[in-house]
Each structure stands twice: as C-alpha cells, then as structure tokens.
Image (tube, helix red, strand yellow):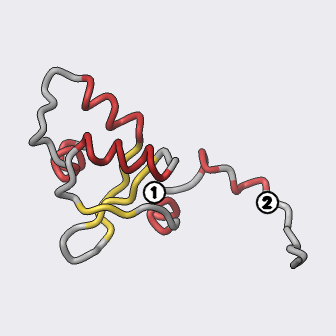
Amino acid sequence: MTLIQTQPRPADACPVHRTAVEVMDATGPQVCDDMSVEVALAVMAAARTGRLVVCDQDEQRIGLVTRTALTAVRDSGACTDRVRLRDILATR
C-alpha cells in the first residue's frame, strides 16, 4: 500500500473565483467543437462532470461549456440535432 500525502487547499482555490484562463487550463474532458448538444450532454454524464473543454480541429482550446448551458439550449425551442458546440460558443 502506498501512502499518499495531501496538502490543504488554499482559500482562493474555490472554483467560483477562478478566471476563464484558469478554467481553460484545467484538465478535464476535451471535445471537438462539431459535437452536437445531445452528444455533449451524454459525454458529460458518462464522465460525471459538469463541464467540457471545447477544442477546434487543430486541438486548440476555444471555450468551455457547462451542463447548465447545454441543458438550457436543449430545452429551448430552437434546439435541433444540428446545433453544435461551436454554435453555442459563437452566440456568447
């Protein structure tokens, strides 16, 4: 058995107070911007995460989407199976 030593988190490590750059630098599930909203929600559920880092075809990080934002888009009347993550990022 290996002993793991942990360190306390600093008070400013709260994710609510993180900048967009810090969030973009965070590791996590990365998906392509041509993914549909429904597939992205399925990926989030499978990964048990509340956010996805969106990358372009060159694997450059271009944005971040949250479950709340994707659910709002899906539940709106304008959502079809053709709505892609890049469309959501473009409207912000």
Quarter occupied by the C terminus: top left
The circle on residue 9 is 2
Local secondary structure at mark 1: helix
Label count reads: 2
- Compare residues 3 and 79 and report the one nearer the observer: 3
- Compare residues 20 and 83 and report the one nearer the observer: 83
Quickly name the residue at label 1. 20
To which quarter of the image does residue 58 belong?
bottom left
Q: Is residue 22 above or below residue 71?
A: below
Quarter occupied by the N terminus: bottom right
Q: Which residue does the image show at 31% across and 48% down from the upper left?
A: 40
As drawn, is 34 to the left or to the right of 42?
left
Q: Amino acid at mark 2?
A: Arg
Q: If you read the primary sequence from the N terminus, does the residue marked by circle 2 or circle 1 appear first?
A: 2
Q: Quick one: label 2, few (<14), some, or many (20+) residues within 10 Å?
A: few
Local secondary structure at mark 2: loop
**x then y, percent, for residue 43:** 37, 50
Q: Amino acid at mark 1?
A: Ala
As drawn, is 92 to the left or to the right of 13?
left
**x then y, percent, for residue 78:** 13, 26
Q: Give the Cα distance between marks 2 and 1.
A: 20 Å
To which quarter of the image does residue 10 belong?
bottom right
